[in-house]
Image (cartoon, grey):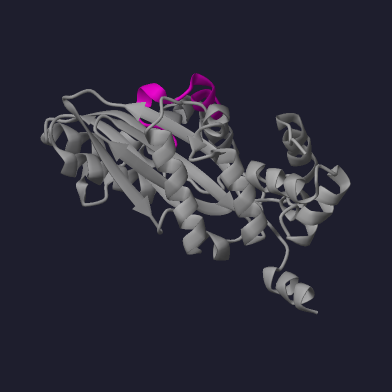
Amino acid sequence: MDISASMVKDLRERTGAGMMDCKKALVETNGDMDKAIDYLREKGISKAAKKAERIAAEGLSNIYIDGNNAVVIELNSETDFVAKNSEFKELLNTIGNAILSSDVTKLEDALNIKVGNETINDLIINATAKIGEKISLRRIEKVTKEDNQVFGSYLHMGGKIASLTIVDGDNEDVAKDVAMQAAAMRPLYVNIQSVPEEDLEHEKSVIKEQVINEGKKPEFADKIVEGRIRKFYEETVLEEQAFIKDSSLTVKGYLENNKCKLVNLIKFEVGEGMEKRNDNFAEEVMSQIK
C-alpha cells in the first residue's frame, strides 16, 4: 500500500512520534491507522505525546560560534538528571550547530530545520520518546558581529547559565571577562541607558516609600532616593557593577582601561521565569518500578 504524506502527518499529530517512526508504523501495518497507533505504543514511541503538558524547566544552555556568527540556545528537560545524559548533550550540540549553519533567527523556524531526513522538531519528539521525559527547545538567539568586534563566551555551572558578549576592540580576554561577570553576577541591564523608564520609576517609588516609612525628613527624601538609585545601578547594571577580578574598578572602567566597549550581551539562565517541578523524582522512579 502507498503511504501518503497526509497519513504520516495525521499519525504524527495523533501520537507525537517522529516522521520516520510514523511512516515505518504505517508500512508495517499496511496503512491501518489504529494498528499503527498500537504499533507505536507497543514500541514505546507514542509516549512522547503524553508528556507534552509536563513541565520542562531543567536542561542546558550553550553557545555556538563560527566566524562572525553566534547562537545561544536553551534546551529543556524535566530533570537535571536527564540534562547530564550524554544523549541530551549530543542533541543540544546537534541542534545548536544546525541553527548556527542556517540563516534562521526565530525559534519557530529553527524547529523546521532539516538534520538529515528529519527536522529539529522530529529529533526532539524522538528524544522525548527515547529518554522518557519532555524535551523542548525553549529559546534561541542568533547574533552577528562586525570584523572589528570580538565575541566573549562563558558557560557557568556546566551550561546552567550561558553568557555571550560582543565587544568593540580586539581583545577576546576582555570580552570573556565581561561574559564571566554577567554569568556570575546576573545583571538585569547592560548599561544605565538600557534601564526601562518604568523599571526606574518603579524602583524610585519603592525607595521613596521606604524613606517615608523610616521617618526621614521629607526635604532629605529626594537626596536619599538618588543615593539608593545609585546602589540599584551598582547591583543590577552590568557596566556599573564592581568588576569581579578587581573590585576597585567597575566593569565600565575595566572596558575603558582596555580601550574596549560593550556592544551586546546575551545571557540565558536555564529555567528562568518558568515553574519548576515540585514532585519528588525519586518517588516517581519508584512508582514506575513497582
Magenta part of the chain: 188-202
Give the residue at x 57% y 54%: 58
Q: Reply above or below: 243 against 220.
A: below
Q: Reply above or below: 2 against 84.
A: above
Name the residue at the right extreme.
34
Give the residue at x 52% y 23%: 201
Question: Looking at the image, can residue 200 be seen?
Answer: yes
Total number of numbered discs in the rendering: 0
Q: Is residue 192 magenta?
A: yes
Question: Looking at the image, can residue 266 be seen?
Answer: no
Instruction: Write down the quadrant of residue 100 in the picture.
Output: top left
Of the 4 image quadrants, the one containing the N terminus is: top right
Name the residue at the front extreme.
1
Q: Is residue 199 magenta?
A: yes
Q: Nearer the viewer, residue 249 or 175?
A: 175
Q: Nearer the viewer, residue 227 or 111?
A: 111
x and y percentages locating residue 268 in the rendered image? 46, 42
> Relative to 193, is 41 on the left or the right?
right
x and y percentages locating residue 125 in the rendered image? 64, 47
Q: Nearer the viewer, residue 24 or 68?
A: 24
x and y percentages locating residue 55 in the rendered image? 69, 50
Question: Magenta span: helix, strand or loop, mainly?
Answer: helix
Of the 4 image quadrants, the one containing the C terminus is: bottom right
Instruction: Write down the quadrant of residue 72 in the picture.
Output: top left
Give the residue at x 48% y 29%: 221
Q: Reply above or below: 78 against 186.
A: below
Q: Reply above or below: 138 against 184.
A: above
